[in-house]
Each structure stands twice: as C-alpha cells, then as structure tokens.
C-alpha cells in the first residue's frame, strides 16, 4: 500500500512472470511424481527393477517407460515437455540464463511440436529463450505445461491399463477400495460395495468373478 503508482504498476506487470516461474515448475513436478507412481506399478508387476527406477531422472524417465511398457508416447508432446523442462532448469538453477543447448532446442522443435506450441502460447519459443536474456514464462507456457503433461500422463495411463497383468490391477483395485472404505469390516458389506466401486472406477478392466475372488483371497478378505 505504500508503493508509488509507478512501482505498483511495475510489480503488477511482472506478476505473470513470477506466477509462471512458480507454477510451471510445480506442474512439471506433479508430472514427475506421477511417472514415479507409474514406475511403482511396473515394479510391482515385475517389469522394472528398483535400480532402473533410481537411475531415471526427468530427462530419461519417459524413454525408460516406453521401453518397459512397450508403448510409444506422443513425440511432439515429449519434445515440448523437454523444452519446458530445460527452460525450468534455467530459471531455477542458472538465474534464468539459457545455455547454447537450450537456445538450439528452442529453435529446432519439429514442425508439429512448434505449431502446437505457438497455438497455445501465441509465441515462438525462441522469443523466451535467447542467449544473455533470462528465460521467462507467460500464462501461455503455464497452459502448455499443463496440457503437455496431461496428454503424456493419459497415454501412460492407457499403456498401464493394457500392459499390467490383470492380477496386479485386481489387487490395486481392492487396495483402492479398502482405502476409500476403511471402516467396512463385514465381508458381506465389502462384497456388495465393491461391485459398485469397480463399476464406477475400474469398469474398463471388466474383472471376472474368479479374478475378484482371487484378489480377495490375496488381500485376506
């Protein structure tokens, strides 16, 4: 309240950049945590080792997932993700100053990835990434980060749906049910509630009665 009008106007004009500097890393961090959850399911199913998970980072995690899940993720979205990730790294670790590799990446997106980038943000990424100029994020880059991570996450979800064993999914579904209904201890109540729960959240699996019964036995019901 004690600022001059000029100073207040200056702060407000920079607010979008400050919001982007906080929100874009947050969006990417949530996605990285989601990928770790996916790795946990693959490990549970015996498709990946703990050492492989430990050695994966944000630059290699999608490639590792593709190898283990046997499914290609959308290449244009991955291009956009990695460019945003490198811009994020510059903001957090280098005072915003981009290195030549980042500048090159901003100018060499594939035509499809570039078209989608510009459609969402309204600008060529090179306008945000120039040598000697601190990287900044606008509202457009935040929207793009959310859209890109959502698309990649959806494709990973589809890959896990089809790639995990049905017994693993049955166990996960029962654990999910138990966490949602911790106070249901009577087996008859559990069985009745489970039918509706699976229909609402796991219908796509279409678990059979033998599969459900086996999962209940493994869970000690």
Image (cartoon, helix red, strand yellow):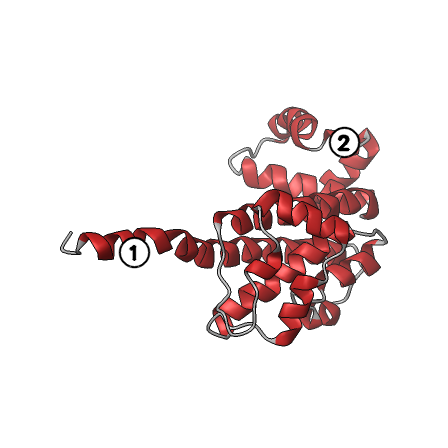
Of discs 2 and 1, which sits in the foreground?
1
Residue 129 tag number: none
Asked which secondary structure carries label 2, the reply is helix
Q: Secondary structure at mark 1?
A: helix
Q: Where's the C terminus, which quadrant? A: top right
**Residue at x 54%, y 53% (from the top left corner):** 27
Q: Residue at x 41, y 51 (%)?
A: 16
Foreground residue, 182 or 90?
Answer: 90
Q: Is residue 127 visible?
A: yes
Query: Residue 114: horizontal and vertical position, in percent?
Result: 69, 52
The residue nearer to you, when weighing 130 against 199, is: 130
Mark 2–mark 1 distance (CA, rounded to whole Å): 52 Å
> Is 206 rendered above or below residue 148?
above
178 in relation to 49, above or below: above
Residue 8 % position (x, y)? 24, 53
How busy is the neighbourhood of tag 2: few (under 14 within 10 Å), some, or many (20 plus)?
Answer: few
Q: Earlier in the sequence, mark 2 or mark 1?
A: 1
Numbered disc total: 2
Q: Residue furthest left?
A: 2
Rendered view: 219 above or below 62: above
Taking 161 as reference, is 38 left or right? left
Residue 172, located in which quarter of the rendered image? top right
Q: Quadrant of residue 81?
A: bottom right
Image location (x, y in percent) of residue 101: 66, 73
Residue name at image x 60 percent, y 26 percent:
189
Instruction: Quickly name the residue at label 2.
Output: 204
Question: Front-most of 45 and 181?
Answer: 45
Q: Give the residue pinned by disc 1.
A: 10
Question: Can you give x and y, in whole percent of width and height, for residue 26 in the image?
Answer: 50, 56
């Amino acid at each position: 309240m004690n600022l001059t009008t000029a100073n207040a106007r200056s702060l407000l004009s920079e607010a979008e950049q400050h919001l982007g500097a906080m929100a874009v890393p947050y969006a990417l961090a949530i996605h990285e945590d989601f990928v770790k959850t996916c790795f946990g399911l693959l490990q549970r199913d015996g498709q990946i080792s703990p050492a492989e998970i430990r050695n994966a980072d944000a630059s290699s995690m999608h490639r590792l997932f593709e190898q283990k899940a046997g499914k290609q993720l959308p290449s244009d979205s991955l291009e956009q993700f990695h460019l945003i990730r490198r811009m994020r790294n510059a903001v957090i670790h280098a005072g915003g100053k981009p290195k030549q590799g980042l500048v090159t990446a901003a100018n060499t997106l594939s035509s499809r990835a570039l078209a989608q980038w510009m459609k969402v943000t309204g600008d060529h990424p090179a306008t945000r990434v120039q040598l000697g100029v601190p990287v900044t994020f606008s509202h457009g880059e935040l929207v793009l980060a959310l859209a890109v991570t959502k698309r990649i996450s959806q494709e990973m979800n589809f890959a896990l749906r089809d790639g995990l064993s049905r017994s693993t999914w049955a166990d996960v579904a029962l654990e999910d049910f138990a966490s949602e209904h911790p106070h249901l201890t009577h087996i008859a109540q559990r069985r009745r509630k489970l039918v509706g729960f699976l229909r609402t959240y796991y219908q796509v699996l279409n678990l059979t009665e033998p599969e459900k019964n086996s999962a209940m036995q493994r869970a000690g019901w």
